[in-house]
Amino acid sequence: MTTTPWVPGGPGTLSDGRDRSAFPSDFLWGTATASYQVEGSPTTDGKGPSIWDTFTHEPGRVAGGENGDVACDHYVRMPEDVALMAGLGVNAYRFSVSWPRVRPIGSGAVEPRGLDFYDRLVDQLLAAGIAPTLTLYHWDLPQALEDAGGWLNRDTAYRFGEYAGIVAERLGDRVHTWITVNEAVVVSTFGYALGTHAPGRMLLFDSFPATHHVLLGHGLAAAAVRAAVPGARVAITHNLSPVHAVSDSDADRRAAAAMDAIQNGLYMDPVLLGRYPDPEVVGAPMDRSCVLDGDLDVIRAPLDALGINYYNPTLVKAPGEGNPFPFEITAMEGYETTDMGWPVVPDGLRELLVGVRARYGDALPPVMVTENGAAFPDVLIEAPEGDVAHVDDPRRVEYLRSHIAAVAAARDAGVDVTGYFVWSLLDNFEWAEGYAKRFGLIYVDYPTQRRIPKLSYSWYRAFLGGPA
Ligand code: FCB
């Protein structure tokens, strides 16, 4: 589709020419962040160490040896960040609670000062007319629990359920939307199978207990939130990707089916259908003895919403000789790529949303796109004295216009999508990539912690300010 580029001051239209009025007036429009990526203040107010505090201080783990000790200093600058959101015109904000701020060693004593921070955040959001959308686990596991085996240890799932109940008791009178876990696939694959994320374990397919225990933790947390917060909207967020085979050959198609099962089915099927994908389709050894009687009933607890994070589709071919995986990921040619090297495929979001609806039918609850966005090499242009600095990111503007249009197209096709959150509000600590990858609508000048809204912030504001 050829689209006219957006010009500052122009109406906030999508790439298909539509505007906000293509969506219902109660649609959630937000931005998202995660505790470790923005907060900093790793020991303030009694916070215990998380696996990311440990991991980032080990040599060679993160690009440039960077860590989240300061990040966006959001723990200190939270009021300024809420004001920036209010200026943007969003009606929702997705943030995560840091488990070791609330329970420094993951079990035992609760740290009220940690809870106080989120209490203040929630109050400030509500005062600005922004609905808090709370994620309980966005990867910062208390280190003490990792020392006892982390997500490989079934006990961690029970501790997570307890922690969920503690947070829900404190904030449930004001927070309606609760997301248990962010991207269980990344927790398990990057954290325990490949070791590129904390805690850096490299167990390949022996990491399956981490998958299962995170999902069990989800089920226990969902129940704890429901018990504490009558009427809560309870969700889990998955990172899904439409998977395609490079050719129609049996080998390539088998590889695509395996990748689809490992990325999508392993997380969607237990939560929505109460079963894991067939081992034949997964095509890899996975010892499932950690799955005990009754676990899948806990995991399949009814959901009020499903969060989907979308970044790109995946193209797959049969594995080459010596490859331990049942697939090989291959580059998608002919697409613009982001600073992460990810292809920009807006229609993949429509395809994904329509695809999950077709696959899961009435088992699929309403969907929220809880993350979507792109990293580009943004540059801060300092202005002469008296004038304001600016950051031009027209590629992010077009990314958002085309991806939100894809959400509208999925809604036209009958998928009940109820929200969309841009990743991210602020440039922040991008895990193993450190600070070099900038995803924000707002540029963060790390040496000074100055916030400079980018062109994409102006576009989103124009879109949100349009007819509701
Ligand atoms: C997702 C994560 C989020 C962010 C984006 C770019 O997988 O949930 O924290 O890093 O990727």
Image (cartoon, rainbow, N blue to C red):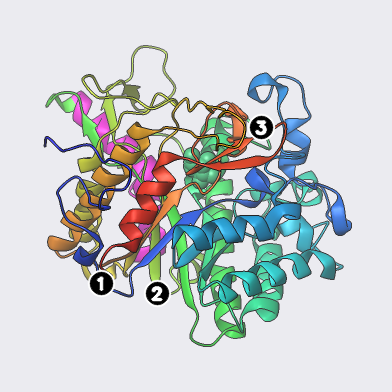
- Residue found at x 33% / y 32%: 395
- Prevailing secondary structure of the magenta residues: helix
Q: Nearer the viewer, residue 217 or 7?
A: 7
Residue at mark 3: 200
- Residue found at x 21% / y 66%: 21
Amino acid carrying mark 1 in the image: Pro
Asked if residue 274 shows in the view, the reply is no
User: Which of labels 2 and 1 is toward the front?
Assistant: 1
Report the side of 339 relative to 312 (left or right). Answer: right
Q: Is label 1 in a helix, a strand or a loop?
A: loop
Q: What distance separates the C-alpha of mark 2 from that of mark 3?
A: 33 Å
- Cβ–Cβ under 8 Å for marks 3 and 1: no
Q: Nearer the viewer, residue 398 or 332?
A: 398
Mark with earlier residue (3, 1): 1
Relative to 299, residue 154 above or below:
above
Res. 24 mark: 1
Q: Is label 2 in a helix, a strand or a loop?
A: loop
User: What residue range appears in magenta?
Assistant: 251-278
Q: Is label 3 in a helix, a strand or a loop?
A: loop
Report the side of 260 relative to 224 (left or right). Answer: left
Q: What distance separates the C-alpha of mark 3 from that of mark 1?
A: 43 Å
Q: Quadrant of the N terminus?
A: top left
User: Which of labels 3 and 1 is toward the front?
Assistant: 1
The residue at the far front in this view is 386
Q: Position of residue 63 (x, y in %)?
A: 63, 22
- Cβ–Cβ under 8 Å for marks 2 and 3: no
Count neighbours of disc 2 (C-alpha within 10 A) and say few if under 14, some if 14 to 19, many if 20 or more.
some
Q: Position of residue 90 (x, y in %)?
A: 44, 62
Amino acid carrying mark 3 in the image: Gly
Quarter assignment of residue 353: bottom left
Residue at mark 2: 304
Amino acid carrying mark 2 in the image: Asp
